[in-house]
Image (cartoon, coloured by chain):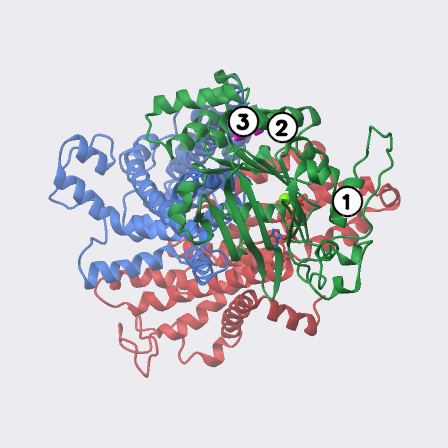
Chain colours: A blue, B green, C red
């Protein structure tokens, strides 16, 4: 166990340079690129004093090095600055208000994609080189290439416009009122005992998470298939069968558990795909998460908010990939010792 | 013979279907294994020993298939048995131990739990009772029960093979098929494991089919010896008989190839030539191209299997006697 | 490299992979032809209102008209120009920069390699579309800006591939010490690295374009790609969404289907080529 701790500490130490690089990258993207953000924000008509004030407020009057130090120091204080429009709320608060919507969508989308991926991947692995296998291979390619907005809009058209069974936008019906506790509506409705609220939240989640889930499942189909085929060839599978362990148990407990490890190691990168997919899913379904928020604030040239949101994404990605690696170490005993 | 047979194999055939070619890895093999008997199957690499072992428990890898013959276990033909029935026999009645102990355990599960899982899938026991059983068998094979909670990678190869054996006997089967159980291990561990087999045979009345390419080892531990060549069983009989008076020219060749310490004849003899390709084996007797006693008939007709003083021989030299 | 006879043999042995390559290649080919011949095959001016708005598909308007009365079919045809131009140029840009950095990193090693690698790994780990969004947001709309935003995302792909090749060649060269003594950088590059990279390059390149097609469409769907009124599938898809819920599906559907078709085309091409050129690797 001692070395699990050592592993985790090493892994955490390795995350620090990654965070720094990403923060630096964001810093440069937000500054080096052409166009004066201040002019872009206030417009050409602004008076010189106005421009000067904003410039000072954004710290743009200082040298780059000073700006960079301020920027990093601010982030480490957990501060992402203030929005430049509408009440000038702290960016952290703005993000915190929208993050639960994105989190709920990605959790459901992720679950859908892993379930589909496991099902199709195992099925293909159990019948290698057959028609089933080939069709699922094609499924993997097509699912990955499905453009999220197109699939989402097809769903909206079929389920929302023609069949009228699912809502095409938003997170809840206007008349349903569930107190916000965590911001995850499914969880909040359970906590406050509202069955209507719970099903309303699921009902709204259905199309967006199905869209996101299907598109991401293609990658899992492939990953699961490949690693399952490899595991099924291993000696210990034959040994388990030789001991009379039922075949279903061998395949779905022993083989699947082992096949899942390579899939898990890829999950950090998959999470990046999930976040990117969520931006498109949110915009397609008017889902009030960070994705729609980011796009909206880009339109309004809310420069600090855009920077803060991108920084938030960077931190999120770093922490998730750290978490994935730690979970991996906990699941696979061979890493620990 | 006083022993009654536990396992009777009759004209068993197991082929690998590789597109248009068919590899006849086991091609008409018959022999009996009695209760409390160790039968060794020896032969060069590729002679079909493993295929035979896997065919008995019906775990041939794709594209292998049993294409004929019978495997009578206590009078029941396993070849026709549906998979669910077969799963009840595997482990419970017939266990298997394979060559590579390093890869034969599920790496993600504690070894104790793997033994418990095996026991519980055959007996209606509580987890605690199964645990006690597991510890008992760990002790029996010489693994301290404190290591119940360790993972496979924390054990040495020899210890892992002992764990495999513990699992194989924990369900108290009648027969264990051990396919080269010590090939991956060093000589001292090999001797320990062979002792363990003998002990199990004597104390539990187990029958063992020991698959090996080491005829000297077979002579040491086995009651019966079968010699396989290119998918055929060339000779099968008690190990003493075969040691003292090998009949088949191939058996003689194998025995001569063993360096003999007693007569200080350390020169390594070997049989000239290579084993045939099983996709297109030689006509007639499969050994004839390498046989020093080759006759004309050998290349045209497959020799019959002849019973000779309680031993089986597949050679024209005997047929004529 | 591949003679006709070999190709024929391959086709027989690996029917499915060959089929994938052919189907993928055909889709890609059709879109390229569409892009090149756009002025000759499109029935109307894609920029102008040519009829009433929101007309459903008919003989006159094969794919109907959009909310401004523009011919959807003509816009789809011209849209292929935008997507092909943006993705090809940005992929070539990524490849050039990524290869250059990969060579530098692999040859110099040490601190340069460390720094470049960690930068590239960080970019690689960051969600591609969001990175492109950030760059595009700062650059503002425009064809070239879109090209730059997308190319940033894929530089690490080539960097990692080339760096890996250089390192493995270096290792080989230590073994073949004699070669190492006499070899100059460009010999190493042309004699050792290129032959190893060339067979996987078409595979990586077309996979990359498949991805870039989706990123380009994503950017313009979000309004961060090429500016209106340039015909663009992602933008037109978004533009049609307003009217989708009223049942005017054709404005969105056709551009959207073409995005997916083109992405599938390049994916199949990559997949099939991978199996044919590097048959040892399974999917
Ligand atoms: N999965 C398989 N697919 C096709 N052919 C196989 C397969 N397994 C074994 N064979 C072939 O069957 C023949 C017998 O193989 P088998 O493994 O039974 O021999 P063996 O006597 O156990 O050899 P060894 O001493 O090397 O373990 C060989 O010719 C081998 O090539
Ligand atoms: Mg073998």
Question: Residue at left 67%, top 58%?
Answer: B278
Please report the residue visible at 82 percent of the width from the left and 29 percent of the height from the top: B261
The boundaries of the magenta stretch are B160-166
Q: Chain of mark 3?
A: B
Residue nearest the viewer, comparing C103 with B274: B274
In the rendered structure, the answer to whether residue B85 lies left or right of residue A67 reads left
Q: CA distance from mark 2 to mark 3?
A: 10 Å
Where on the picture, by quarter, is residue C205?
bottom right
Which callout, 2 or 1, points at the residue further toward the start of the chain?
A: 2
Query: Where is mark 3, residue-wise?
Result: B200
Q: Under tag 1, what secondary structure?
A: helix
Are the two marked residues, 2 and 1, in contact with CB atoms closer than 8 angstroms? no
Q: Percent x, y for residue B71?
A: 50, 49
Task: Provide the major secondary structure of the magenta segment.
Answer: helix
Q: Nearer the viewer, mark 2 or mark 1?
A: 1
Cα distance in 3D space between marks 3 and 1: 31 Å
Q: Residue at x 69, y 34 (%)?
A: B219
Question: At which x and y percent is residue C139?
Answer: 48, 49
Evaluate if marks 2 and 3 touch, with contact meaning CB atoms under 8 Å apart. no
Q: Position of residue C271 (x, y in %)?
A: 54, 59
Which chain's residue wears label 2? B
Query: At 41% across and 49% down in the image, what residue appears?
Result: B83
């Amino acid at each position: 166990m001692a070395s699990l701790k050592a592993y985790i500490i090493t892994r955490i130490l390795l995350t620090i340079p990654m965070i720094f690089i990403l923060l630096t990258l964001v810093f440069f993207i937000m500054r080096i690129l052409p166009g004066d953000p201040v002019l872009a924000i206030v417009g050409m008509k602004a008076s010189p004093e106005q421009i000067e004030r904003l410039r000072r407020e954004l710290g743009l009057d200082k040298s780059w090095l000073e700006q960079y130090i301020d920027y990093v120091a601010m982030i480490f204080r957990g501060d992402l600055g203030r929005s430049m429009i509408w009440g000038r709320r702290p960016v952290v608060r703005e993000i915190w208000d929208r993050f639960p919507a994105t989190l709920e969508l990605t959790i459901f989308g992720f679950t859908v994609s892993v379930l589909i991926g496991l099902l199709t991947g195992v099925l293909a692995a159990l019948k290698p080189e057959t028609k089933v296998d080939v069709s699922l291979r094609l499924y993997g390619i097509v699912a990955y290439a499905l453009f999220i907005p197109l699939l989402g809009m097809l769903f909206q058209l079929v389920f929302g416009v023609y069949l009228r069974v699912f809502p095409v936008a938003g997170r809840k019906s206007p008349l349903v009122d569930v107190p916000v506790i965590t911001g995850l509506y499914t969880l909040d409705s359970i906590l406050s005992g509202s069955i209507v609220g719970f099903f309303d939240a699921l009902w709204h989640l259905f199309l967006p998470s199905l869209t996101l889930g299907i598109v991401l499942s293609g990658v899992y189909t492939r990953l699961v298939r490949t690693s399952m085929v490899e595991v099924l060839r291993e000696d210990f599978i034959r040994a388990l069968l030789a001991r009379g362990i039922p075949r279903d148990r061998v395949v779905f407990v022993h083989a699947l558990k082992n096949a899942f490890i390579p899939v898990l190691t890829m999950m950090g990168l998959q999470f990046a795909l999930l976040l990117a997919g969520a931006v498109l899913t949110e915009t397609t379904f008017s889902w009030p998460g960070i994705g729609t928020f980011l796009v909206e604030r880009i339109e309004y040239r809310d420069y600090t908010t855009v920077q803060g949101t991108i920084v938030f994404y960077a931190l999120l990605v770093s922490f998730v990939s750290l978490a994935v690696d730690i979970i991996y170490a906990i699941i696979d005993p061979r890493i620990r010792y | 013979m006083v022993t009654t047979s536990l396992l009777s194999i009759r004209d068993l055939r197991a082929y690998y279907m590789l597109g248009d070619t068919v590899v006849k890895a086991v091609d008409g093999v018959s022999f009996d294994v009695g209760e409390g008997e160790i039968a060794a199957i020896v032969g060069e690499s590729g002679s079909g020993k493993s295929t035979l072992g896997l065919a008995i428990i019906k775990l041939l890898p794709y594209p292998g298939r049993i294409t004929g013959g019978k495997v009578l276990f206590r009078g029941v033909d396993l070849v026709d048995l549906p998979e669910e029935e077969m799963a009840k026999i595997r482990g419970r009645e017939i266990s298997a131990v394979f060559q590579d102990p390093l890869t034969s355990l599920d790496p993600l599960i504690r070894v104790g739990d793997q033994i418990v899982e095996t026991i519980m899938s055959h007996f209606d026991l509580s987890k605690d009772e199964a645990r006690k059983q597991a510890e008992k068998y760990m002790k029996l094979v010489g693994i301290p029960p404190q290591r119940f909670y360790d993972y496979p990678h924390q054990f040495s190869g020899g210890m892992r093979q002992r764990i495999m054996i513990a699992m194989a006997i924990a369900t108290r089967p009648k027969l264990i098929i051990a396919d080269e159980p010590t090939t991956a291990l060093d000589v001292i561990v090999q001797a320990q494991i062979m002792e363990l087999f003998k002990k199990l045979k004597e104390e539990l009345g187990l029958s063992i089919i020991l698959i090996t390419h080491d005829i000297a080892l077979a002579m040491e531990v086995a009651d019966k010896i079968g010699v396989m060549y290119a998918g055929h069983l060339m000779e099968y009989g008690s190990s003493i008989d075969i040691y003292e008076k090998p009949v088949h020219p191939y058996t003689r060749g194998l025995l001569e190839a063993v360096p003999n310490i007693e007569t200080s004849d350390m020169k390594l003899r070997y049989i000239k030539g290579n084993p045939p390709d099983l996709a297109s084996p030689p006509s007639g007797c499969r050994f004839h191209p390498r046989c020093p006693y080759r006759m004309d008939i050998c290349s045209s007709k497959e020799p019959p299997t002849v019973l000779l003083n309680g031993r089986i021989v597949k050679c024209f030299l005997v047929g004529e006697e | 490299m591949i003679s006709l006879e070999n190709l024929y043999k391959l086709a027989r042995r690996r029917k499915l992979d060959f089929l994938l390559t052919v189907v993928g290649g055909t889709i890609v080919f059709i879109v390229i032809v569409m892009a090149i011949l756009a002025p000759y095959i499109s029935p109307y001016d894609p920029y102008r209102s040519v009829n009433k708005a929101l007309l459903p598909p008919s003989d006159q308007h094969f794919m109907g008209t959009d909310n401004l009365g523009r011919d959807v079919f003509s816009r789809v045809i011209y849209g292929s120009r935008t997507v092909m131009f943006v993705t090809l140029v940005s992929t070539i840009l990524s490849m050039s920069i990524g290869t250059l950095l990969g060579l530098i990193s692999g040859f110099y090693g040490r601190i340069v390699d460390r720094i470049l690698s960690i930068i590239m790994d960080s970019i690689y780990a960051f969600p591609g579309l969001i990175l492109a969004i950030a760059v595009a947001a700062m650059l503002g709309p425009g064809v070239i800006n879109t090209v730059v935003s997308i190319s940033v995302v894929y530089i690490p792909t080539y960097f990692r591939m080339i760096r890996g090749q250089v390192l493995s060649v270096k290792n080989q060269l230590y073994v073949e010490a004699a070669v190492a003594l006499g070899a100059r950088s460009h010999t190493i590059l042309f004699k050792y690295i290129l032959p190893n990279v060339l067979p996987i390059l078409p595979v990586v390149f077309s996979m990359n374009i498949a991805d870039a097609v989706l990123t380009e469409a994503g950017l313009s769907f979000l309004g961060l790609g090429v500016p209106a009124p340039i015909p663009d599938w992602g933008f037109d898809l978004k533009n049609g969404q307003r009217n989708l819920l009223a049942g005017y599906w054709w404005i969105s559907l056709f551009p959207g289907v073409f995005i997916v078709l083109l992405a599938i085309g390049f994916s199949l091409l990559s997949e099939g080529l991978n199996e044919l050129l590097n048959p040892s690797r399974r999917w």
